[in-house]
Image: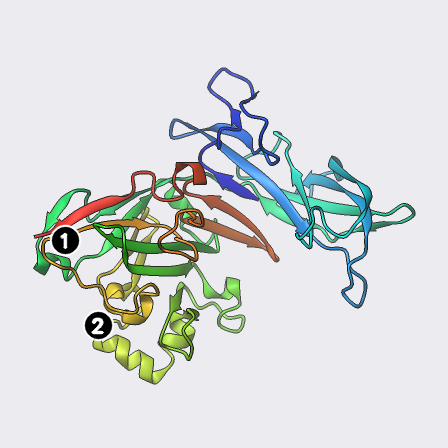
Amino acid sequence: MERVPFTNNTFSAEPGQGLVQLGSGHEVMPQALNPIEGHNSSYVAAFVFSVVDNASTPIPIMGFNLLRREKDIGEFKPVSRTHYDRPKTETRPGWGVHQGFDTSSELEEGKEYEYEIEAFTATDTLKSPVLTGKVMEAFTYSLKAPENRKKISAAEAANMSYSCTISNKKLLTTEQADWCDLGLLILDGQGQPVFGSKLRYVFDGVTVGIGGGSTTGPDLLIDTIGFAPGNKPRRFSYKQHLAATPRISAYLQSHGINNLNDLITVNSSTGIITITDKFLKIAQFNVVAGTPMEYQAGVSYQWDIQDWGDNAYGLNDDRALRIVKMYGSSQSRTMGNNSSSGSNAVNGRFTFVIE
């Protein structure tokens, strides 16, 4: 399940107004919930699956039914039916999977739901295990520091951290989520990326299989280059890999990094996430340039907090900061923005100038 803070111009739910479909050009149309921070908000429940035999060979099916109930309450009821014109192993050519959606407007924020998928052929029916998901609460996030259009001295910039504020701060807790995906992107005045990082802040490592089943507390999974052979970024846990490898740990300590808070702080009381100045001094964390962040006098910079995709230059693969809760192997997630609004902070991008 995915929650976004805006409607993507598919449905409107203004106060005192019922659901109004605004466009018919979308095959997936999220449903409107109550306005968040003065804006409409949406969700979509998507299901991707395959039907295979014991040798993992795809089995053609004629279609599938999707059934739902509120978690542990009542019987499963049908919510959608997909019927193909012929037996298929995928919904569309090249997908390799079947895809279905729950487009009901009945789902409620904060509630957990269970689903079953019934795949059928002309003669048989196969039922999936129960799948669980949650309509998570919505949020937006805004850039905080360094401030927009600020003039900053070179000395101040050398020790400058970057921070944003989450509007729904209770999402930054283990009760509400398992991790937060984000990234930091800094560009020069010509739009060329000079620093790009990607990271996953895990509220408790045990929820993602870190620590061998024991509670490890917060951890940070960081995309890196240079800590392992090859030119492609490799993601490592700070606690389980970087801090536990003597050579790398000594290197980080030489830059004043002795614990997780020296890299990032996530404050559920204030809703503020801060990527520290020490983080930006580690060349291996800069996966677009492989160098520490160094500011040049007289140069203007842009910055934003987002997952900037596979290409730091392009905008088509960007994704806003998102907060995720896992139910088995299924994700329930809430996005801080949507693609039509820039897939970044709602007030981004900020600029500053080095004096």
Looking at marks 1 and 2 on the same chain, the residue that comes earlier in the sequence is marked by: 2
* Residue receiving disc 2: 256
- Asked whether the beta carbons under mark 1 and mark 2 sit within 8 Å of each other, the answer is no
Which of the image's four quarters has the N terminus? top right
Residue lying at 30% horizontally and 69% vertically, measured from the top left: 290
Extreme residue in the top direction: 16
Q: Count all numbered tags in the image, as a single digit.
A: 2
- Say if 131 sits above or below 284 in the image: above
Observer able to see residue 24: yes
Query: Closest to the observer: 197 or 214?
Result: 197
Q: Position of residue 224 (x, y in %)?
A: 37, 69
In the rendered structure, the answer to whether residue 58 lies left or right of residue 156 reads: right
In the rendered structure, the answer to whether residue 83 lies left or right of residue 350 reads: right
Q: Position of residue 156 (x, y in %)?
A: 11, 57
User: Dot 1, how many residues are within 10 Å of its Cα: few (below 14), some (14-19), or many (20+)?
Assistant: few
- Say if 159 sits above or below 32 in the image: below
Q: Quadrant of residue 257?
A: bottom left
Which amino acid type is marked by label 2? Gly
Which amino acid type is marked by label 1? Val
Q: Position of residue 179 (x, y in %)?
A: 45, 56
Which disc, if any, is residue 299? Answer: 1
